[in-house]
Image (spheres, coloured by chain):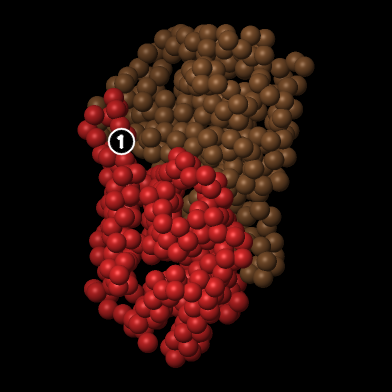
Chain colours: A red, B brown
Amino acid sequence: MAFDQTYAAYVDSVEQALELYLPLPRDAWPETGIPSALAEAMRYSLLAGGKRLRPVLLLASHDMLLNEEASVLPFAAAVEMIHTYSLIHDDLPAMDNDDLRRGRPTSHKAFGEAAAILAGDALLNLAYEVMARSRHPRAIEALAVIAGAAGSSGMIAGQSADIWMESRTPDAGMLAYIHRHKTADLISAPVVAGMILAGADERLVERGREYGLRLGLAFQIVDDLLDEMGDEEKMGKRLRKDRSAGKLTWPGIYGMEGAKQEARAQINLALEALAPFGEKADFLTALAQNSLTRVV
Amino acid sequence: MAFDQTYAAYVDSVEQALELYLPLPRDAWPETGIPSALAEAMRYSLLAGGKRLRPVLLLASHDMLLNEEASVLPFAAAVEMIHTYSLIHDDLPAMDNDDLRRGRPTSHKAFGEAAAILAGDALLNLAYEVMARSRHPRAIEALAVIAGAAGSSGMIAGQSADIWMESRTPDAGMLAYIHRHKTADLISAPVVAGMILAGADERLVERGREYGLRLGLAFQIVDDLLDEMGDEEKMGKRLRKDRSAGKLTWPGIYGMEGAKQEARAQINLALEALAPFGEKADFLTALAQNSLTRVV
């Protein structure tokens, strides 16, 4: 299958899994079900489309080694739930204060702040519940990897640094820390988890981790570049906000050309990491290469 | 050992476990460690004392059946982390908007709203990471129980109902739903998890679930009563706020005497559930009986 068709097939599987695990809004509570507003807010953000990059990475990494997609769908759904919760909380007035996400009002604009906080909390919890109920024999190892990448030494460390770096001298080291943790950790984790769930040995898992981290750093640099180059209406969100908030970006430190070079360098390292997988890595190779096409 | 000494010994174990799992604030980040403000906010709320009721219930339930406390400390710490994250988020301006918790400024008053949101998120994540890394052979079952009780069909359903019930006709059914989910689910879950971790059969686990739910409902009624009867300075938080916000409470529906009767009835049901455990349940029996002494 061509890359685009394979990607679309993975996305289809992810969408079905998300629908399966999400609660339904019911009119009948408190007798049965949960408050409709909570279920609606969870569905609104999780079913808003998007690239589904993280779950696709999990499915594709697993697929390289073992053809048992159904057994890992709970983990693919879980990483997307965690990604979505982080966006909901990031958008809150006390955080980035964004009104628009994927061309629609952000959760707190659509449902109010309390609902947005609780919907984010609920998606984070649901991610862990879905993984724990998966009955996969390696569930606990994969869950540990994802929790580590999402938590206070992973994504949340990056979010915190992003918010509080204004009070410190911003430099390239700080920027690398933020990109690594805020973005790359939760792009690397699904690759690692997919391989662990397939029973890969530590040497291969380490290559997957390297691929994911390099890809994640490249994605963040590309995101910074698109933020400078992009069209707000087309992108469905407010742009050039980081710069106006005095936040550090890769183009801000290295210039547009330097940032493009760095993105290419990271993608080359990502591709090198895939060497031991040979042809099986064709999809992950194409995914990494395609990530640059929007900016170079 | 007398009840108070046993309780204090459990609390000691819990405090040590919490300290062990919490990140330390370091000046050296981004080179090593995590942003100090994140670590400080996590520590501030989690190490603020409190009864540690939920982890004590987990340790005591496990202890009834198996004397291997060290192996379940990660789970005890995790339920307290989840409880604490829920308090931090509940206190936020968009939620209950409370300035005081256990006699100290709430997290968002001490660290700002962004830090409070992220510290709550981080504690929730850390709870799952600590359980996943426990290496306990029954970790995944216990984690699933705790996630179910904390999530969108458990505690968060109760929080949501509590916030949005103003828009519906409040009645006794709604109040029962809120108490059951907002409070009792996360009091029952550690009892169930403690027993599952000890390898208890389904019949005993069911008794534990019933004990925890009844105890949790009684606790919430007692809390409502203390809210009416209490002294703000002594309690370290704002009181009679639910009533002034037009929220439903047990005394509000059934009167003070009716609420006391209901608390006693729930405690009697909790004690009945412990019958199969005989003398081994002495501690849980005393805990349930003592919960009433502050109000009757």
Name the residue: 40% across, 19% down. B250
Disc 1 is attached to a residue of which chain? A
Q: Is residue A230 left or right of residue A54?
A: left
Name the residue: 38% across, 65% down. A53
The quadrant holding residue A31 is top left
B103 over A204 or under it: above or below: above
Q: Residue B226: image x %, image y %?
A: 52, 21
- Looking at the image, the residue that sits furthest to the right is B1
> Quick one: SS at disc 1?
loop
Q: Is residue B262 left or right of residue A154?
A: left
Residue matched to label 1: A35
Q: Is residue B122 left or right of residue A16?
A: right
Can residue B98 be seen by looking at this rendering?
no
Q: Which of the pair A83/A168 is nearer the observer?
A: A83
B243 over A126 or under it: above or below: above
Q: Residue B103: image x %, image y %?
A: 60, 37
Name the residue: 31% across, 80% down. A230
Q: Which of the pair B73/A226 is nearer the observer?
A: B73
Check the picture and name the quadrant holding the N terminus of chain B.
top right
Q: Residues within 10 Å of mark 1 (few under 14, many from 20)?
A: many
Name the residue: 39% across, 39% down. B152
- Say what amino acid the circle numbered 1 marks: Pro
Q: Residue B145: image x %, image y %?
A: 49, 33
Can residue B214 be seen by looking at this rendering?
yes
B280 over A261 or under it: above or below: above
Q: Which of the pair A280/A261 is nearer the observer?
A: A280
Q: Which of the pair A195/B288 is nearer the observer?
A: A195
Check the picture and name the quadrant holding the C terminus of chain B.
top right
